[in-house]
Amino acid sequence: MLSLIVFLPIIAGLIILAVPASQKQIIRIVSLLAAVAQGVLAVLIWRQYDPTMAGIVAAPGGSPVGSFQLIERIPWISLNLGSFGPMTIEYFIGVDGLSITMVILTALISIIGVLSSWPIQKQVKGYFILFNLLSTAMMGCFVALDFFLFYVFWEVMLLPMYFLIGIWGGPNREYAAIKFFLYTLFGSVFMLLVMIGLYFSVIDPVTGNHTFSLVAMADQHNYVAGSILGPGSVMWRYAAFIVLFVGFAIKVPMFPFHTWLPDAHVEAPTPISVILAGVLLKLGTYGMMRINFPLFPEVYQAGLYVIGIFGAINIIYGAFCALAQQDLKKMVAYSSISHMGYVLLGMAAGNSEGMLGALYQMFNHGTITAMLFLLVGVIYDRAHSRQIDKFGGLASYMPVYAGLVTVAWFASLGLPGLSGFISEAFVFVGAFTAPVTRPIAMVSVLGIVFGAAYLLWSLQRMFLGKRKPDALYEVETDGHGHEHIHFHDWNGKLDLDARELTMLIPLAIIVIVLGIYPMPIMGMLTASINKLVTVLAPVAAAAVH
């Protein structure tokens, strides 16, 4: 099932290759069917996954080497490198609580992305081929348990995203696309070096050969004494951790590596902004939790305070930048930077509460920010403007739109009863519980206040008060002194149409339901989060001792 959910979009892309470019509707339908099939598979995987049972990965000799479920593991590339001995790269995939939530999120956002892409008219065939390639790469990253395989999927993501922004984006799309590509590639190059160093430092306990298995790398007993990244190579292990952390931090994006994100969001078409904020940013924090921390636990423990500081900077700096924006899309982009700071803060706590809040925040932020960017796209389609001050009184003639914006805005600021509150609450419980992050948490709480400020201020200016002409309508006075409003609507639409409601209402339901009853997601996370914290706990205990 995991292979099918990963490669279904590629199959759809191959089918689209055979479809004439003039058959735009068929191309859209094929992409939608593939995305819906992914969603169905995600539900089946969720139903089959047992969060209370640690699924055992069996190595070729039958020895347990990890705790994942729905395992698929076969040799992919087998070579004999002479003096270096045999080399095997595996097609090794599986899920645990960390990854299954991201699989569900990716499937959901992919469906939303295809529906949001329906109005695309420019080079539809090329667009959907790239979109499907991007979906495969994202899903592959979340299930890969071989570092080499993870790196392949990670790099494949760059190509479609570069062209999706660079061809279908706004006026400065080339600049934004190149900036995104170079930033991410910079981190990837150093990730490659660390991956090679880890390969020659780790021995598979069953085969006795070097391995790219992330499961084997997470067991400190598998490292070769005296190897470049072995337990005794303190300096090199610190360097490797920092390099990997920067590579993932760029994707988060963490201050000061965040500057590519506002440009990419502003220039990207709405569906790509939804994918970028809903899924791609989560790959950065997921990479930290899957690779950075388990492989270098002692460096992680030593850097908790620093990670927490960067989380606080993200929270407050992102909120201040959002507060200063006049462009609605740029405001939402900076709000993403701020809210990803909560994930960093939760991870810096190093306890189950903080980690659980961080991972739940990743899922919730994916649904909330997808909703936010869709709503920005709706108003831009109609008014061809995103300037907040150009609007006023929108609630009086777009009531459904205003209602959904209110749900998304309040979920983003963490209103109790909506999903954003639960995850942020757990992050702060974890951060206040851990002595190292307690003072940082006290400062970070201000981010909630600033978040409420920019969200409520924009809500007031756009939806309340007097109507402002020019953005959505113009006022004409007839010969009898009567005023008539003529709306500058888009294809005869003003409030939300059926396609837009199909995208937004499911997200609104998820935000509300998971705010009231979060267990469908949190229940899957707990066992894996506790295991991750247990892996790191002996290091912490030794440090305290």
Image (spheres, rainbow, N blue to C red):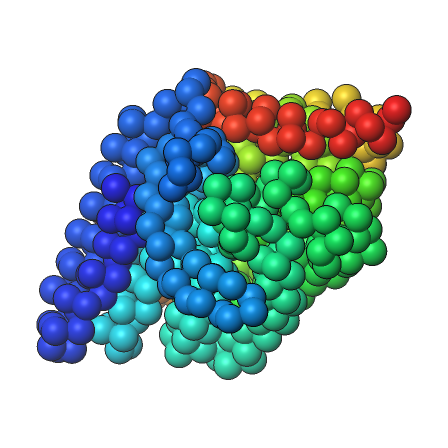
Between residue 465 and residue 404, name the one nearer to us.
404
Between residue 373 and residue 8, name the one nearer to us.
8
Q: Which quadrant is the N terminus positioned in?
A: top left
Can residue 216 be seen in this snapshot?
yes
Figure check: 207 above or below 468: above
Question: What residue is shown at x 61% (from left), y 59% (from top)?
Answer: 200
Figure check: 308 above or below 146: above
Figure check: 168 above or below 288: below
Name the side, left or right, on which 13 lies relative to 213.
left
Q: Which quadrant is the C terminus positioned in?
A: top right
Q: Quadrant of residue 390?
A: bottom right
Q: Quadrant of residue 297?
A: top right
Question: What residue is shown at x 11% (from left), y 77% (from top)?
Answer: 20
Name the side, left or right, on which 434 lies relative to 68.
right
Can residue 268 be seen in this snapshot?
no
Question: What residue is shown at x 23% (from left), y 54% (from top)?
Answer: 8
- The number of discs equals 0
Residue 310 place in picture, x, y as percent = 77, 48
Between residue 82 and residue 12, name the one nearer to us.
82
Q: Quadrant of residue 242?
A: bottom right
Residue 29 place in picture, x, y as percent = 15, 58
Between residue 386 and residue 448, name the one nearer to us.
448
Question: What residue is shown at x 46% (from left), y 21% (from top)?
Answer: 523
Residue 427 place in picture, x, y as percent = 66, 30
